[in-house]
Structures are given as C-alpha cells and as structure tokens.
Amino acid sequence: MSRPRMLLLVLGLIQMLLAFSYVQASSGTWASLPMTVAPYLTENSYIPSTVPVLVGTPPQQVNLTVDVSSAILATFGSDCILCAGSTMFDPDLSSTFKTNDTPWELTGPSFSGVYVSDTVGFGGLFSAADQPFVNVLDGSDSSLSSTIWNGHLGLFLSPLNATSTARHVLTHLYESSSLLNPVIGMRFGPANPKITIGALDPNDYEGTINWVQLDQTPDTKGDYFNTFSFDGLKGYDGQFVPYGTPKAALDSFSLSISVPNAFTYFNNSNSTGPVPDPIGLVADTGLFEYNCTTTGSSSIPPNSPYVALTATINGVDYQIDSTGNLLRPETAIGSIGSCPVGIKNRTDTAQPGVLLGLPFLRSVYVAYRFPTDNCPGYYGFAFPSGSNRTQVQISQTPAATPTNSAQCLSLATPTSTPTASVVTAQEAFSKKIYIVYGKQGADQVSLVGVEDMPKMVWNWTGLTPV
C-alpha cells in the first residue's frame, strides 16, 4: 500500500473516532448549558442571550441567540455576508451536512438563507440526526444583525404551525426518547445564566413552579403566539395598573416591558412611587426618563430612583428588578442626568396586550413544557435561586392548577448533572498547516487529528543496498 493512501486511511479512521466520541447518550437524560447574557440592560448597546449548540460531524460549537417566541433554528454560514457573531457554521467541515438549496421562505433582500440538515446536539449528551435548519448566507440587514449573533435558536413550538412543531429539534429529541422530560428551564439574569434541556434543575429556582397553559388559539392577527392569561402589572402601591386583563407573551429580544399605554403608569404617582420630576419621553427610543443618580458614565447602571413594577401571574407576584434592568444608564440621545426606564407603549393593538421582555425574564426563572402528544404547551415561573427575594415572596402559591397537570406536568426530578467530553471540529484541526499531496502550489491546510497519529519510524536498514 502506498504511503499517501495509508495516510488517508489513518486520517479517515481518526475522523470516525472523533465522530463516535460525539454520540447520543442513553435514553432519558438532560443537559445544563451556560447562557451568555448582558451584565445589565442599556440602550447604548445590545448583547443577545446565546447558548452553545453543537452542529455537524465532528461537532462545531455555534453560540446561537435564544428566542423564546419563535421556532426558527438557523446558523450563520461561515461565508455569510455581513453576519454578526464569532462562531459561524462551516458546512465543509461536516461529513453529515446535506442541502437541497431550497430557499428559506422568510428570505428578504438583505437577509437570506437556504434549508439544510445536519446533526444538532447539546452538551454532547444528545443529538438529532438530519435535523433541518436554515443556513443564513446574507445577514446584511442591520436591524437583524444587531440583535442576532451567530444564528437563531427558537424555543417556542407554535400551536398554529403543526409542520414547524413536527420538525423542531425539541420534538425530535423527545420522540427519540433522548430527554428525561419534555421541558426546558431558563435563567436570563446575569447571576448564573443558563438553560437546561430535558429537566428543571431544583438548584436553579426557589418556590413552587407556577404553571400556566399557553393559549391554543392565539390571535392570528397578532405578532406573538406564545400568549397566556395574565393577571396584570402592579405599581409601587401594590395595586394593579388599570390595563384590564390583557394577554401576555414573553420576548427575549425586547429590552422593555411593553404595555397598552405607558402614560397610565407614569402619570400616576401611586404607581410610580416617589420618583424625582421631571418625567420625560424620548421620541427616538420611545422610553420615558427619570432624573437619576449617575456617575456621568453611560457604562455604569444607576441605582436610583427605584422603578416599581410587578408582574402578577396566576395569583403570584413577580417583582421586576430595577437597577440595570428597568432603570438604565443614560444615553447619548437622552437628557443629561436622565436615565431611560424600560417601560414603553405597545404599538400593536392585537393581543397580547403586554410583552414581558428581558427586564422580566432576567428577574424570574422560566420553565417551558413544550407540547407533545395530548399535552399543550405550558410556561412555568419561579424565583431564581440566589436572588434577593424574601421568604414571603418565595412562599406564594398559585391561584389555580392547570387542567391535565397530573398527565402533563408530572416531571422527573434529576438526581445529578450529566456531563460529556466533546471534541469539537475547531479543536480537532491541527494548529499547523500541511502541503496537500498531489496538488503542488495549492494552499496548505489543517488536518483533523494529525497530532494524535503515531510517529512513523523508517527502517533505513531495509532500504540500504546489500
């Protein structure tokens, strides 16, 4: 056998070993993954919430942007035009990548991609083979590139789109019996941000999980379908701000709490509490401002005045944190010495009436029991462990229990946190580059697993003429 052919065979064997090092674990497990989030919210810059996802064979780590109101799974291709981020997906590095070049139906003039499929996994603990997703090839739309980095991880299965639900990665993992439970848990706050897939880690939250069923017939004219019944918002005086009883939805892209009429809150001193005048509206941001205690730096969140706002869901009050969350550092387009407040008008008249954006998500623990079989989708809310909540707050109990709780919400509690050793494609490639045999003058390339190959020892004695 020729030496070049032997090298190709050895490299092929190493590639297979790398692929086998990333296999699906035994049925019924779960994964805990770190989430990268902004240290505080500000209008001066936007840092999306991202989690590591493994794509391809051998796996490439792509830190996808989390979206709790959509089902779209998308990567930014390595040759994508003006895509934002630092971890792109390179199809050429994956032996299991497939494409038929079908255009993505949501393609626009400056944001486009094609449907592809490949292995998609989490934490090296479970994966879905031939998982369909979008590979974005043009990300030059500035409005999207500023909010989506590396790609998009949609974590909502819409009751209005059976096709999308059937091909979702969570559905595939559930149907292959890979997950301990059909559930995910999320901590968006800067203290220990993370996501768990397949189980709810009891170390991540305090109090009772407050489950509410998601609407099965959301308003088709609206722009959000992850809607649920909502008691309302309370102000400083502990009374409901008079918005009626609108539906609510979660939005992990929104920097604010959006309400039917923000003036209803800001023009009522009982709702705002003792805050300094004046209160002004900045037209460019749509946000109100308070005179605030500031260091003169736009990179340090102020700690006063206090913005009082509480979301009440199924009889339980969830305090929305103020410092660095509802109350933001001053901006260049605002008034000097004034700080934006993350409460704004909701312009869409369709339901939901209230959007609970990042200020809310960073203040609570969120669980999502995604729909399977005869069970609809549910959101669950609790208090993040380690947060500054009183025992009185934590000990609140929900006003009602959803129908079919015994069937759909009896989840297995994990007893330990599983881990796996994963060698990514980025780690597998050699740091040195090598000449390509038979292609004189071609660019030198990295090789997979070349450092692990045994050194070749030549038998010079056998080559010496007698």
Image: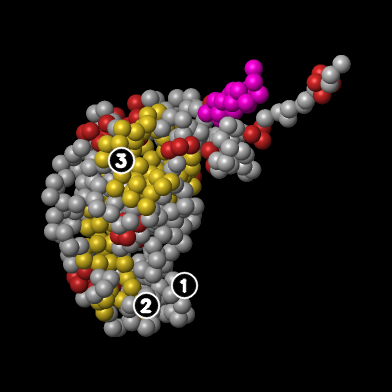
Write the residue at 45% across / 41% down. 90
Three-letter amino acid code of the residue under disc 2: Ala
Q: Quadrant of the N terminus?
A: top right
What crowding class fits label 3: few (fewer than 14 Cα within 10 Å), some (14-19), or many (20 or more)? some
Write the residue at 30% across / 83% down. 277
Three-letter amino acid code of the residue under disc 3: Val
Q: Is residue 462 magenta?
A: no
For label 1, the residue is 300
Q: Looking at the picture, how far across and down is residue 445, in whole percent?
A: 57, 40
Write the residue at 27% across / 36% down. 102
Closer to the eye: label 2 or 1: 2
- Describe the element under mark 2 as helix, strand or loop: loop
Say which label, 2 or 3, has the lower sequence index.
3
Q: Which residues are magenta?
A: 1-19
For label 2, the residue is 332
In this rendering, the count of numbered labels is: 3
Q: CA distance from mark 2 to mark 3?
A: 39 Å
Write the residue at 16% across / 51% down. 222
Q: Is residue 6 magenta?
A: yes
Say which label, 2 or 1, has the lower sequence index.
1
Q: Answer left or right for 459 relative to 136.
A: right
For label 3, the residue is 114
Front residue of 9 and 18 = 9
What crowding class fits label 2: few (fewer than 14 Cα within 10 Å), some (14-19), or many (20 or more)? few
Q: Looking at the picture, how far across and down is residue 150, in whole percent?
A: 41, 50
Q: Answer left or right for 429 relative to 34.
A: right
Say which label, 3 or 1, has the lower sequence index.
3
Front residue of 3 and 320 = 3
